[in-house]
Amino acid sequence: MAYAPRMPFSIFGLEAEILRAIQQAGYVRPTQVQAACIPKVLQGHDVIAIAQTGTGKTAAFVLPLLHRLSQGKRQNPSRPMIKALILAPTRELAVQIMDNIRAYGQYLPIRVAAIHGGVDEDAQIKALRKGVQIVVATPGRLLDLLGRQQLDFSLLEMLILDEADRMLHMGFLPDIETIIGTLPKRRQTLMFSATLSKEVESLARRFQYQPKIVQIGKRSNPADTVVQCVYEVPAHLKNALLLELIRQPKFQRVLVFCRMKDGADRLTNFLKVAQMKVAKLHSSRSQDQRLQALQDFKDGKIQVLVATDIVARGIDIEGVTHVVNYDFPVNPEDYVHRIGRTGRAEAQGDAISFVPRQDLNLLDRLELFIGRRLARKRLREFNYHAPVPPPMPGEKPPRRDWRKRTRDMEARQAAQPAKRAPQRPGNERREKS
Ligand code: AMP
């Protein structure tokens, strides 16, 4: 982890209760992103912070936020008002941020609620009615509750977008604009991400006032603690290669990314039949199933977690030894975030990507994006020329290749220009948070 040289946490003048919680977390020194952000946030500046995955961004905004809240005007302790809103793209990340706030704020009288889909609204409404100073939310449920007048942002002072580039992406942007429209104009706005293009940065600035830019390391670069490599393998042999690899003892905690939910289902079934300890996590699972899968993975009860990109952003799981891109990510940013689930804090990790011939163009694009060529590896004694295996009992035929589907759709649209629907911004497919 990139630490700030010879700098103690006490240098920032944070409340003693916060320092005590930091000590309890075992942190000795601030990381670089914390050292750069904490003073700027304490001074009240808007900030855009770009730093590699797993380098302590959450504490970089939570610690000064807690300090500012504890310094602010005394509120009615029996019913505090919302002072800060943190937006995150997935439920799991919202819950993780809330847990971080609770840990760093355990000695302060600060109340926080997580507002996200997949669980009963009533409990969330109850928590809001009791009064909280901090709300951590995914956009969908927050908009529902806003529509039902369950949130009062009139005294809000701080807005934080975690995974800011995801939140400002076309799919989320209309929701974010609506939410920001309900907030006071005079506020402090912070944006955090590991990847942020110059274009998204200028979009972010629309919601900020003269933001200070903190950039640690190169933009859009994976963490240095992750060793990356690529296996060029025919698509029909990806299952067999994965199994060969994860049967090696060093593959202790393996996070496998699939592009689609049904692909994740099929791969999970295959690994179960092969007697592997495996669970799956995607947006069609219930919230209980999602939480259980993540917990079992964290506790080491399962060796392999097969997931879609909803786990790619921000989720902090200790000791992930390997990330496997079973399906190569379509967007280079997603690659950076996916592999950032390993090599976190001071740990080392391995990221392996399977690249069948039809994905070689995606690999080229990625290498251009990260500015380096990835090492090619081959597993000795693996038969890269084996024929297509017969389907497993009860196996559904795979859905047609997504690229072919896109090509077919484009061809159909081109043939009928008059019927073509106008493109609405934000109308693209995205997984529910
Ligand atoms: P984050 O990037 O916020 O998800 O943090 C990544 C990991 O680094 C988490 O497990 C944090 O607990 C840990 N961490 C954050 N700040 C520090 C620090 N100053 N010293 C040691 N570990 C830290």
Image (cartoon, rainbow, N blue to C red):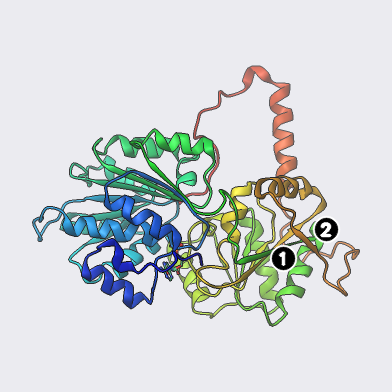
Question: Residue 221: x percent and y percent?
Answer: 60, 53
The picture quadrant for ligand 1 comes to: bottom left
Looking at the image, residue 80 sits to the left or right of residue 98; the answer is: left
Question: Residue 276: x percent and y percent?
Answer: 66, 78
Look at mark 2 in the image and give the residue it sits on. Answer: 234
Amino acid identity at mark 1 = Gly
Q: Helix or strand or loop: what does disc 1 sit on? A: loop
Residue sitting at the far top: 418
Residue at 60% across / 61% down in the picture? 339
Question: Residue 83: x percent and y percent?
Answer: 22, 50
Looking at the image, residue 47 sits to the left or right of residue 184; the answer is: right
Q: Nearer the viewer, mark 1 or mark 2?
A: 2
* Residue 96 vertical position relative to residue 176 in the rendered view, above or below: below
Question: Can residue 132 be seen from the camera position used here?
Answer: no
Q: Helix or strand or loop: what does disc 2 sit on? A: loop
The mark nearer the N terminus, 1 or 2, is: 2
Q: Callout 1: 10 Å neighbours few (<14), some, many (20+)?
A: few
User: Which quadrant of the view contains residue 11?
Assistant: bottom left
252 or 140: nearer the eye?
Answer: 252
424 or 177: nearer the eye?
Answer: 177
265 or 56: nearer the eye?
Answer: 56
Residue at 49% across / 44% down in the picture? 165
Residue 394: assigned label: 1
Question: Residue 395: x percent and y percent?
Answer: 72, 63
Give the CA separation, mark 1 to mark 2. 23 Å
User: Which quadrant of the view contains residue 183?
Assistant: top left
* Residue 292 vertical position relative to residue 220 in the rendered view, above or below: below
